Image (cartoon, rainbow, N blue to C red):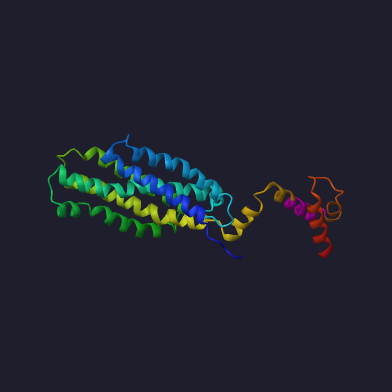
C-alpha cells in the first residue's frame, strides 16, 4: 500500500508547538500580558485541537491516536511523560543551588551532582536482574516510588547549612529509582504497542457500517446457512453486507 505524507498534520503540530515554545520563552522577558505570550498561547489552543482532529481522519497520520485506546500502553506513556519532567530537573536545580546558595564554582557544582547519573547507571543494571524475578509493572512501580522518596528526602535536607552527604544520598536515590523505572517502563511500552495489523483492524472497524459488516461475517461463521441467506436472528445487515457474506459463503 502506498503511504502518503501527512503534510497538514506535520504543519499543524509544528506551528502549534512553535507557538507554545514562543509563549513559554517570552514570559520572562515580556511578561504574561505580552501580545507574544497571549498570541502564542491562543495559537496553540486553536491549532493543537485541529491537529488532533486531522489525525483522526487522515489515512497515514503523524500520530496514530487509536493506539492509545490500549490502556496499558497509554498509561505507560503518560507515566513516562510525567516522570520525565522531575527526572531532568534535579541536576539543573541542584547545580544552581550549589553555586548560588553554597557559593561553589560551576565546576564543583557539576561534580557534586554526579551521584544522580551514578544512581541511574546502577539502577539500570539492577533493573535487568529484577525483572527476572518479577514483572515489569512491579519493577517500574517500585522505581517510581524510590525516586519519589529521594525527592521528598531532598526537600527536607536542603536548608543551606546541610553537609554534602545529606544531599548526595537523596540524589543517588533519585538516580537509582529513575534508572530502575526507565528501562522497565520502556519495555512495557514496547510490549503493549499495537502492531500494524492491530492498527489496520482498528482503522477498518472504526466506522459503524464496518462494524455491521463484521457482525455479518461473525454470525455467518456461527450459523452459516441461515445467516448467509438473511433468515437468521441477529442484527440486520445491509444489502451490501448480505452480498459479501453470501459471496464468501459460496466460495468457501
Which corner quadrant holds the N terminus?
bottom right
Is residue 178 found left or right of 246 in the rendered image?
left
Q: Is residue 219 magenta?
A: yes
- Return the x and y of residue 169 as percentages of the image width and height: 24, 48
Residue 125 appears anywhere in the view? yes
Q: Residue at x 74, y 48 (%)?
A: 212
Count of numbered circles in the view: 0
Q: Residue at x 39, y 46 (%)?
A: 19
Q: Residue furthest front?
A: 35
Query: In terms of image quadrants, where is residue 93?
Result: top left
Q: Residue furthest top?
A: 33
Q: Residue at x 24, y 37 (%)?
A: 156
**In this view of the protein, which residue sits in the foreground, 112 or 206?**
206
Residue 135 appears anywhere in the view? no
Q: Residue at x 39, y 52 (%)?
A: 181
- Return the x and y of residue 85 as percentages of the image width and height: 35, 46
Which residues are drawn in magenta? 213-223
Is residue 194 found left or right of 174 in the rendered image?
right
Amino acid at each position: 500500500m502506498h503511504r502518503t505524507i501527512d503534510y497538514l498534520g506535520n504543519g499543524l503540530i509544528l506551528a502549534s508547538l512553535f507557538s507554545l515554545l514562543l509563549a513559554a520563552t517570552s514570559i520572562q522577558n515580556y511578561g504574561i500580558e505580552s501580545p507574544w505570550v497571549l498570541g502564542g498561547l491562543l495559537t496553540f489552543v486553536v491549532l493543537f485541537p485541529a491537529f488532533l482532529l486531522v489525525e483522526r481522519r487522515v489515512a497515514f497520520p503523524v500520530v496514530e491516536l487509536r493506539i492509545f485506546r490500549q490502556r496499558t500502553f497509554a498509561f505507560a506513556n503518560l507515566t513516562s511523560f510525567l516522570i520525565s519532567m522531575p527526572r531532568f530537573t534535579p541536576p539543573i536545580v541542584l547545580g544552581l543551588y550549589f553555586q548560588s546558595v553554597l557559593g561553589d564554582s560551576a565546576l564543583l557544582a557539576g561534580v557534586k551532582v554526579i551521584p544522580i547519573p551514578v544512581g541511574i547507571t546502577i539502577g539500570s543494571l539492577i533493573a535487568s536482574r529484577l525483572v527476572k524475578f518479577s514483572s515489569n509493572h512491579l519493577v517500574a512501580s517500585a522505581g517510581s516510588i524510590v525516586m519519589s522518596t529521594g525527592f521528598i528526602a531532598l526537600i527536607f535536607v536542603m536548608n543551606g547549612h546541610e553537609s554534602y552527604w545529606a544531599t548526595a544520598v537523596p540524589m543517588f536515590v533519585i538516580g537509582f529509582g529513575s534508572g530502575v523505572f526507565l528501562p522497565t517502563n520502556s519495555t512495557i511500552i514496547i510490549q503493549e504497542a499495537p502492531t500494524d495489523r492491530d492498527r489496520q483492524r482498528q482503522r477498518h472497524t472504526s466506522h459503524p457500517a464496518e462494524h455491521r459488516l463484521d457482525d455479518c461475517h461473525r454470525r455467518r461463521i456461527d450459523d452459516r446457512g441461515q445467516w448467509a441467506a438473511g433468515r437468521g436472528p441477529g442484527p440486520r445487515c445491509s444489502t451490501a453486507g448480505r452480498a459479501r457474506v453470501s459471496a464468501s459463503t459460496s466460495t468457501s
